[in-house]
Image (cartoon, helix red, strand yellow):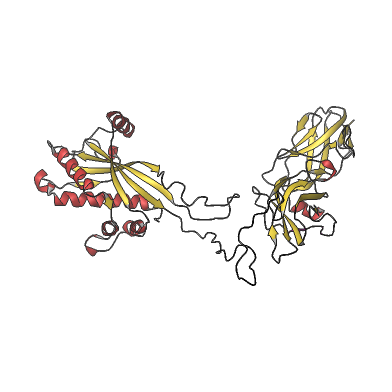
């Protein structure tokens, strides 16, 4: 694959190809002056009142994705966007305008005819042609730009570059030249396809598969694909992360229960991941309770107070690791979702208004509020923003002007996640009631 300089390298090769064609056609002798090839925008070829010299101009006016190669090698990263899985190529088609400029009669037509004949006779840019075009002229020293283009690996990419004429209608040509804001010149359109640009970054390289399942000690063959007529999982699998007391969210200090199948075994642990805050394997694993009688279908783990500085409020992906009883290596389950909500630790409270009718108070909570997170206090149905303070913070200060007198149910909302306010713990379920999470303003 080529590097990011491949686009410039293709333009340089085409310019060299057209220059050679003009020399072979001896147009300098026919036109009475040297004919060159430029690679400028058309509005920069003839400046002001300068005389128009005989020349060809090669202008890259569009770059489009190549449909045949567009999805090759994808995905290039994992779902979190952090681990590079492969260096997927960027496949591009380059669209050029070849225009002829001259102040002499029929000179522009001569130039364009030679250019079109050269490109017609060169439908493919061979590897030898690319290397020759990017080599220094006469074996001399190359400029830094030419050395960079020669190192673009354009000649070594998997697919050769083909040159295809494009049919530009009168309307398309009119729109192009109007956008360029230049006077129209005899022009032909061409497409160079395909340019494959690829990054040269380390990627994950999976190991080859040595066997499919256990190997029979007598036959020496692996078990292969086994069909089991059951809907039960054949590997450890999670179905739900259930916070305690029937709450939809978990809080620091809770014991969360993971439900699933085939969860029994040794070395059971739980890992929580948060993509946006880049919390993943770096979080210490939480030891699970492996002694429970329902170990095959349940894993319980505590959200200890020590995690308040590690796990911020947010939506987490939870997976378990367990070494099945008949195996020696740990297996990871699928991911399930778990919402971690804030817990206010100094409620209920009573606040007295000052002489101006304002109420000022602090709300203590866990886990800490981090930079980039937004917090708001909801009293009843009204929302109040906290005063600014350094982050991370476990205390937020609020000042409510003309504070409403009375007892108000309180919810702390961080990044759209509210602290629980409804008691759902009754068994059997009954009409829910509100928790003791209120602020009374006197």
* Spot occupied by residue 344 in the image (x, y as percentages of width and height): 83, 42
Q: Nearer the viewer, residue 163 or 110?
A: 163
Residue 11 visible in the snapshot: yes
Quarter the N terminus occupies: bottom left
Residue 53 visible in the snapshot: no
Q: Nearer the viewer, residue 49 or 190?
A: 190
Q: Is residue 93 magenta?
A: no
Residue 42 appears in which quarter of the rendering?
Answer: top left
Q: Is residue 290 magenta?
A: yes
Looking at the magenta stretch, what is its main secondary structure?
loop
* Spot occupied by residue 356 in the image (x, y as percentages of width and height): 83, 28
Q: Residue at x 64, y 69 (%)?
A: 216
Give, as a single range, the part of the protein colored magenta.
285-291
**Is 384 rendered above or below residue 228?**
above
Furthest-bottom residue in this view: 218
17 on left or right of 193? left
* Spot occupied by residue 124 in the image (x, y as percentages of width and height): 28, 51
Q: Nearer the viewer, residue 245 or 141?
A: 245
208 on left or right of 411? left
Quarter the C terminus occupies: top right
**Is 370 rendered above or below residue 49?**
below
* Spot occupied by residue 388 in the image (x, y as percentages of width and height): 72, 41
80 on left or right of 232? left
Number of numbered tags placed on the structure image: 0
Q: Residue at x 19, y 52 (%)?
A: 20
């Amino acid at each position: 694959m080529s590097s990011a300089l491949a686009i410039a390298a293709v333009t340089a090769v085409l310019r060299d190809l057209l220059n050679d064609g003009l020399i072979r056609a001896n147009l300098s002798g026919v036109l009475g002056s040297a004919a060159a090839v430029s690679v400028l925008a058309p509005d920069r070829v003839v400046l002001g009142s300068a005389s128009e010299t005989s020349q060809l101009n090669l202008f890259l006016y569009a770059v489009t994705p190549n449909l045949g190669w567009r999805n090759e090698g994808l995905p290039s990263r994992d779902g979190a966007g952090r681990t590079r899985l492969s260096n997927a190529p960027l496949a591009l088609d380059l669209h050029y305008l070849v225009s002829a400029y001259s102040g002499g009669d029929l000179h522009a037509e001569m130039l364009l005819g030679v250019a079109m004949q050269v490109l017609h006779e060169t439908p493919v840019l061979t590897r030898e042609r690319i290397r020759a075009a990017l080599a220094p002229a006469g074996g001399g020293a190359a400029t830094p730009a030419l050395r960079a283009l020669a190192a673009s690996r354009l000649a070594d990419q998997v697919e050769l570059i083909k040159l295809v004429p494009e049919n530009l209608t009168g309307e398309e040509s009119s729109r192009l030249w109007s956008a360029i804001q230049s006077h129209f010149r005899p022009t032909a359109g061409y497409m160079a396809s395909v340019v494959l640009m690829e990054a040269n970054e380390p990627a994950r390289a999976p190991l080859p598969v040595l066997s499919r399942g256990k190997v029979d000690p007598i036959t020496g063959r692996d078990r292969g694909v086994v069909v089991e007529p059951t809907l039960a999982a054949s590997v450890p699998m999670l179905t739900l992360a259930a916070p305690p007391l029937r709450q939809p969210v978990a809080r620091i200090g809770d014991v969360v229960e993971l439900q699933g199948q085939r969860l029994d075994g040794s070395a059971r642990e739980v890992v929580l991941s948060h993509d946006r805050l880049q919390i993943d394997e770096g979080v210490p694993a939480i030891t699970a309770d492996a002694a429970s009688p329902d170990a095959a279908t349940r894993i319980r783990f505590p959200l200890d107070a020590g995690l308040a500085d590690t796990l911020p409020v947010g939506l987490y992906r939870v997976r378990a690791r367990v070494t099945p009883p008949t195996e020696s290596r740990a297996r990871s389950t699928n991911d399930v979702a778990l919402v971690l909500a804030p817990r206010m630790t100094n409620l209920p409270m009573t606040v007295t208004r000052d002489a101006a009718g304002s109420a000022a108070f602090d709300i203590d909570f866990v886990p800490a509020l981090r930079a980039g997170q937004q917090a708001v206090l909801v009293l009843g149905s009204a929302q109040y923003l906290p005063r600014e303070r350094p982050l991370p913070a476990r205390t937020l200060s609020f000042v409510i002007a003309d504070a409403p007198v009375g007892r108000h149910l309180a919810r702390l909302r961080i990044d759209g996640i509210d602290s629980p306010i409804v008691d759902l713990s009754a068994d059997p379920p009954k009409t829910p009631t509100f928790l003791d999470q209120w602020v009374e303003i006197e």
